Amino acid sequence: MKPSLQISRSLSIAAEDAVRRASKSLVSRQRPQGFWWADLRADSTLESDYILMELWLHPPVDGVWNPPSRPRIERAVAAILSRQLPDGGFNIYLKGPSEINASIKAYFALKVAGVPAEDPRMKRLCVRILDLGGLQAANSYVRVNLGLFDLFPRSACPSIPPEIILLPFNFIYQMSSWTRAIVIPLSVVHASHPKRPVPAGFNVDELFLSGAPMHPERDLGFFSWRNCFLAVDKFLKFWERISPGVIRRFAIQKCAEWMIARFKNSDGLGAIYPSMQYAIMALDVLGYKADHPLRVEAEKQFNKLMVDNDASGFYMQPCFSPVWDTAIAAFALAETEQPPTDALRKTVDWLISKEIRTSGDWSVKRPRVKPSGWAFEFNNAFYPDVDDTAMVLLAFDKARGSDPAKQAACQKRAVDWLLAMQGKDGGWAAFDVDNNWSILSDVPFADHNAMLDPSCPDITGRVLEALVRQGLGPNHPAIRRGVAYLMRVQEQDGSWYGRWGVNYIYGTFLALRGLRAAGVDENEPCVQHSLEFIRAFQNRDGGWGESCASYDENRYIGNPSTPSQTAWAILALLAGGDIRSESLYNGVEYLVSTQRGDGNWDEEYCTGTGFPRVFYLAYTDYRNTFPLLALSAFRKAIAGSQEESLV
């Protein structure tokens, strides 16, 4: 049954009030410089790795570990324990099940920090780890981290040789940007064969599962790339014993030069937690003393990721997200009927100041392209990304800075850069072009499930919308190729995969907005099929919610409703031309009815994706900015339909 026009008008009025309150609240959180910056939350592994880092930097003396950061470590311990699940384990996303790697990291960190193995919480954790497969079930990076302290056999850890930087065909640039930023410093650490000290008598032997294989198992059958790389790994271990020292030293030197060069104009290597951590450890191995300026700066940037106060407690952020937060907030505000022009003017000016005008890793495959684009963080000059750049262009669509000519030139450069970053398949990826050597996913240290950075529907959809809003027509070759890519990768159930947001709702909303902008008719079967998908998974309360488990199952897995995912579903329906369905109206009603008095919403689940099946993110302002955008879009759609009915 279709809602009546009277109901739509009534709901539109309610949505108008919700938009007003949400806009007011969002503007109040703008920083004086013009940007927005919300906390980025992840799982307990970051706090666990912080304790490991402190053990590396401040080793035990005479078997006793008493680092100068002991009070902070105690707060980290409390933060980790506060997230322990009833079954004893630790998860990788809010409300998710216990996960083996997070649980092992927590056990190591808690025990080395002084929580005794006999503590009931540790006993439950130990039992849960064994139930999940024990230490032998750990992924490569957990194995390597434990191996640094001689707690896991090096023979069962994947080789990460620094000689990787010497391989032909720009080999390191066939890996994703975040992987190379992690692997290069880690290879330097790995090459030093460290056996860093631990407190006297410390071990984690109780976590080894009796009878479980220690080494990665081969695939059955005559040939597979996995078996090939496992054989290569054996050769590399042999090579480490017999290789000429001059080659190893040269490779380490090249890795060090590569790493240090990328400190420039960046808030740490790659400006993300794991690469920044390994960079500090690599500097230590390379002989940089604690007071050396490079190491002081690296540790300073790493410690900035720390939140430690009475209001929020202790936790580590995986990185900062100011450009991303700002672009989304500005776009949502600019799409309202009464955008705050003064606030947006400051925002545009700040974003223009953050445009990257120097070449980075992306230029290896696009050497003749003029630099532009935006990074996710405050400063990350080597790693602008396509998604942030498209989002900034969307924010610029209706927001105006104080210098129109400067803004226009900036937008022109960014459009040209986006066009150059389109892949051969017609889609867009995050940081690189044609980063799709699929065989690399079988490399032994590739089990973080993010070895590659291939084209994905969510980014492609956002780029299409941004390019069209910047003046490219539906018949532009890049637009046509992008549309063809989206048509080709649509799932059988009508959805699109969401690489950077959870998951099929996110991918579908962005793909549909891209197709709508590119002029694809709403009556096309692919569009109608996707709308059926969205409507089919609406919750009884009118909202939508999708679990991170959808990545594990490769299909939609429902969850309690969230404001951000409900907003994405509403935006998907509107992009597909739905302005009258009961699903749409119930979704809008859900957002209106769950808005708090201060204009914001509550959200208890992770809806952001770092590495599918491995690492998830809670963007703490998604719950506010996307509902604002969805309600504004609903208001415009209803107003447009009412005008048509009067003609």
Image (cartoon, rainbow, N blue to C red):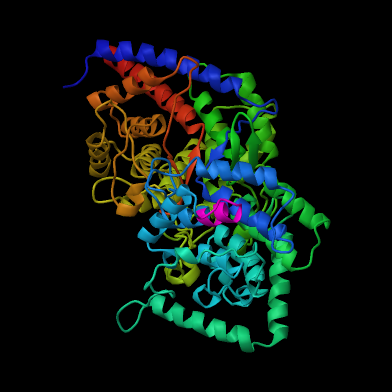
Residue lying furthest front:
118
Residues 170 and 564: in front is 564
Q: Quadrant of residue 187?
A: bottom right
- Along the horizontal axis of the image, is 183 left or right of 119? right
Tell me the residue at 68%/74% (across/down).
192
Tell me if I can see residue 282 in this picture: yes
Q: Quadrant of the C terminus?
A: top left
Give the image location of residue 40, x and y in percent.
55, 39
In this view of the protein, can residue 360 be seen by the observer? Answer: no
Residue lying at 60% horizontally and 39% vertically, measured from the top left: 314
Measured as percent of width and height from the top left, residue 585 is found at 28, 22
| Count of numbered labels shown in the rendering | 0
Q: Residue at x 61, y 31 (%)?
A: 36
Residue at point 29%, 40% (across, down) = 558
User: Looking at the rendering, which quadrant does residue 352 occupy?
Assistant: top right
* Residue 60 x/y as whole percent: 71, 60
Boundaries of the magenta span: 107-117
Residue 393 image position (x, y, % from top left): 55, 38
